[in-house]
Amino acid sequence: MSQDFTIQEEESSPINLGSIIGAAKRRFLFFLIPFVLILVGSVIVGLILPPSYLSGGTILVETQQISPDLVESTLNTDPNQRIKAIEQRVMTRESLLKIIDKYNVYGNDRKVMTVSTLVEWMQENIQIGVITSSLGGRRGEATIAFKVGFIHESPQIATDVANELVTLFLSENVRTRTERATEATAFISEEAEKVRRRLAQVESEIVDYKRKNKDALPEHLGLRQNMLERTEMEIRDMRRDIRALEEEKRYLQIELTSARTGRTAEGGLQQSEPAQSLATLKDQLLDASSRLTDSHPTVISLKKRIAALEQQVEAETAAALAASQGQSSAPTAYNPVVETLQVRISATDEKIAELRRQISAASGRLKDLEAIILEIPQVERGFASLNRTYEDLLAKLNSLETKQAQAQLSQNLEEEKKAERFVLLEPPIIPTEPISPDRPKIMGVGALFALAVGVGFVFLIEFFDKRIRSASELEAVLKHPPIVSIPYIHTQEEAGKQRLKIVFYALIPIAVIALLLVIVHFLYQPLDEIFYKVWMAFDQLRVTLF
């Protein structure tokens, strides 16, 4: 017996479909009420939510029309970066407030809401999307266009604001590129002008340096060396002349002595043999000095012989002078030869003095020339430093002038809109369909949620209700099968109530459907338009299939 009961208990343990149907009949209202309420609420929410319309325009990023090999633009930034930069400029508080006030975007909310809140709403409703194209391989993607749009409850306001934003993007791009190109040209021009001023300053310094060191300029080194050689030659010549004059003076003095003593030849004065040999040797020394150095043996031998003869001549001259002095006490007659020799000796002394003065002046010039030649290397170093600075500045100026010309071409390229630019490809138009809310989705999610809540509510009530309603439930409680089962006998009154319930339950879905249709017709879209759209969709589907 216990074994049979166990088998019956195990057989009754799985979910009984009859029990589920019975529970559904008993708890139909508990399922229907929350289901209807949530479903109607989701429909109302979906229909009450204000529609939002998106209006936007497409802007093409057009590449430079002139080849970059011919004219290179100074603005080579990535289009994405430029779009982001322009976005930050356009979406500033000041710009957005101007648009809000111009088109009355938020109506009366403008008076009650804070400026920060309105700007945040505006920024959230602005949509900017980039359109890229693959370059192939590992080169990544390139931006070829971007979209600018605005979301608003009013299609007209959405279109007006989108047009304003598109205009701002286009004008801001032109203004920014032109401004940057102008700034680049102005900057390079300013730098070139600075270099020109510095170059003029260095030129003035070079002129002043040349004026200050005009006698020691490097280019005059050859001239100074030639002047030094000529001066040295002049000094040597004058010294030779002095020696010749001194010899002549000595000869004149000897002749004067001879004239005073009365020793004359037939034709005039007669020189002694040592004096004649001395003159001959001096002539030989002058000739040898012009050809040989002072250390040459011939020159040295001539100098020794000249020195010996000079001593001998001086001794003879001294003896003659002594003899003449012994006779000077006696009165002498006028001797024109003596007078002539004295005049010639005096003239020779004057020539020697003049030559010595010229030698002193030439020696001074020689020292000055030597000092100047010694100073030339130092002056050359300073001059070379100034020249290097000048050449560097000149090269820098040439480079800046080349860049200035390129920058001016780039500026002209931007001003004439021949460089990379933004072109309006599709202007914003007034939208006819809202992008939100997604009413079918809201209603579908609401229906699923209403179904889940109704089923869950029924399950909870059945779970907490411990009343016994079937023989299987009784058998589960008593652990023993019942002896006999008596079916429930319905009265006439209960049958009538049951029929009323069925009618009521049938009317409820009809009422709900009618209510939904009324809500859709008045709050969303007229039913005839919905029917027309559905009919057109079916007709198109039929044409496609058949």
Image (cartoon, rainbow, N blue to C red):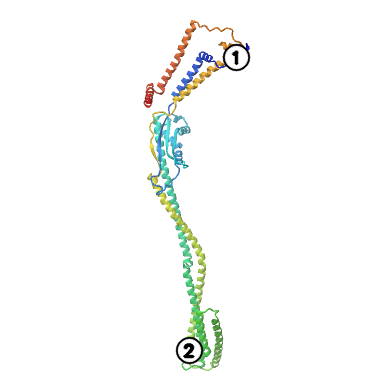
Q: Position of residue 20 (x, y in %)?
A: 53, 15
Q: Earlier in the sequence, mark 1 or mark 2?
A: 1
Task: Mark yes or no: residue 273 visible.
Answer: yes
- Which amino acid type corresponds to the residue marked 2 in the rendered image? Glu
Give residue 90's mark.
none
Task: Mark yes or no: residue 217 visible.
Answer: no
Label 1: element kind: helix
Q: Position of residue 108 (x, y in %)?
A: 43, 29
Q: Position of residue 107 (x, y in %)?
A: 42, 29
Is 537 drawn above or below residue 13 in the view shown?
A: below
At horizontal 50% and vertical 17% (from top left) the residue drawn is 31
* Residue 296, quarter of picture: bottom right
Which residue of the protein is positioned furthest toward the right in this rendering?
2
Is 172 drawn above or below residue 404 in the view shown?
A: above
At horizontal 46% and vertical 13% (from top left) the residue drawn is 505
Local crowd size for mark 2, using a 10 Å CA cut-off: few (<14), some (14–19), many (≥20):
few
Give residue 339's mark.
2
- Which amino acid type corresponds to the residue marked 1 in the rendered image? Ile
Instruction: Using the image as rendered, state which of residue 185 and residue 327 is in the foreground.
Output: 185
Label 2: element kind: helix
At horizontal 52% and vertical 68% (from top left) the residue drawn is 374
Local crowd size for mark 1, using a 10 Å CA cut-off: few (<14), some (14–19), many (≥20):
few
Q: How many marks?
A: 2
Q: Quadrant of the C terminus?
A: top left
Q: Position of residue 41 (x, y in %)?
A: 47, 21
Instruction: Using the image as rendered, state which of residue 334 and residue 247 is in the foreground.
Output: 247
- Check disc 1 and report the residue beneath it: 7
**CA distance for labels 1 and 2:** 186 Å
Residues at circles 1 and 2 in contact by the CB criterion of under 8 Å? no
For marks 1 and 2, give the one nearer the viewer: 1
Instruction: Using the image as rendered, state which of residue 321 and residue 173 is in the foreground.
Output: 173
